[in-house]
Amino acid sequence: MKLIRFGAPGAEKPGIATATGNFDVSAFGEDFGEKFFETDGLSRLSKWWGEHAKNCPAIAEGTRLGSPVQRPSKIICIGLNYADHAKETNAQIPKEPIVFFKSTSSLVGPNDNLIIPRNSQKTDWEVELAVVIGKKASYVEEKDALDYIAGYSLHNDYSEREFQLERGGQWVKGKSCDSFAPLGPWLVTKEEIKDVDNLRLWLTLNGKTMQDGTTANLIFKIPFLVSYLSQFMTLLPGDVISTGTPAGVGLGMNPPLYIKAGDVIELGIDGMGTSKQTAVAYK
């Protein structure tokens, strides 16, 4: 299944995306949040959809999509998880995953505007594969890790590089500005992705390709990441893990290139759809 949430910000309703269009499943009676995943919501929704699909209203084309996951308890990110990205930023290949957080208030819909923060000069892009946790995970063994995954989504891990790297402290400051976590369009359940270790991911800036990579080049693979993180914190249903970005970010260019108001950023991952953000100045 491909899960969506649609409607005005803060008032999204649950839906399902199909080859013939998007459909409202509000009659199912649950949003796609922690409780939904914790109570085997994917299986229950699949069964319900099989019985009620014909009665679900179509969603009008052009309707705004929100994040396919209701605000999670945490957004966990992995830094420098592609060797080519580490090289372009003059960083060493990490011996263990670099872990940081994004504030959940940065979460927005896949096609919402990117708001360049006040006083920002170095807002940058990062196309990433996001993992959505399906059930509570603590001290999970790597061989069992896939059992704890609900599905996957497309994520743009926007970063303000001055805030992140030049202002001291943790990276979270450069990662958590409003609109810095567009997620979606879909949450794609894991059975639809046959080989998560061989997916193309790409990003363009004003129509020019900036990133074109493959998850085959992940340094730390997804089962390892789920297991690793679960040694340090309990992963709750609906939590998002953003797994890192390939080469091609603005920071790594010579000279560096950053986003300005009016720029259009488009991105996609095989099997997970595409998203598009237009940059606007903070007002």
Image: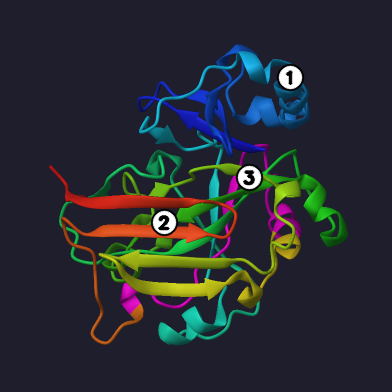
Q: Does 11 sit left or right of 221 as displayed?
A: left
Residue appearing at x 63%, y 45% in the figure: 188
The answer to whether residue 139 shows anywhere in this view is: no
Residue 238: x and y, percent?
Answer: 62, 38
The stretch of residues the image draws in magenta is 226-251
Residue 114: x and y, percent?
Answer: 28, 49
The disc, 3 or 1, on the residue closer to the chain's N-terminal end is 1
Query: Badge 1: how crowded within 10 Å, few (<14), some, or many (20+)?
Result: some
Label 2 element class: helix
Q: Residue 48's mark?
A: 1
Kind of residue indicated by mark 3: Val
Tell me the quadrant of the picture where the C terminus can be found: top left
Of helix, strand and loop, which mostly describes the magenta segment? loop
Q: Quadrant of residue 150?
A: top right
Q: Residue 261's mark?
A: none
Query: Is 246 colored magenta in this rendering?
Result: yes
Query: Badge 3: how crowded within 10 Å, few (<14), some, or many (20+)?
Result: many
Residue appearing at x 75%, y 17% in the figure: 51
The answer to whether residue 223 shows anywhere in this view is: yes
In the image, is residue 256 above or below residue 234? Answer: below
Kind of residue indicated by mark 2: Val
Q: Which residue is mark 2?
A: 172
Q: CA distance from mark 3 to mark 2?
A: 27 Å
Q: Does 36 sit left or right of 125 as displayed?
A: right
Q: Does 229 sit left or right of 278 as displayed?
A: right
Label 3 element class: strand
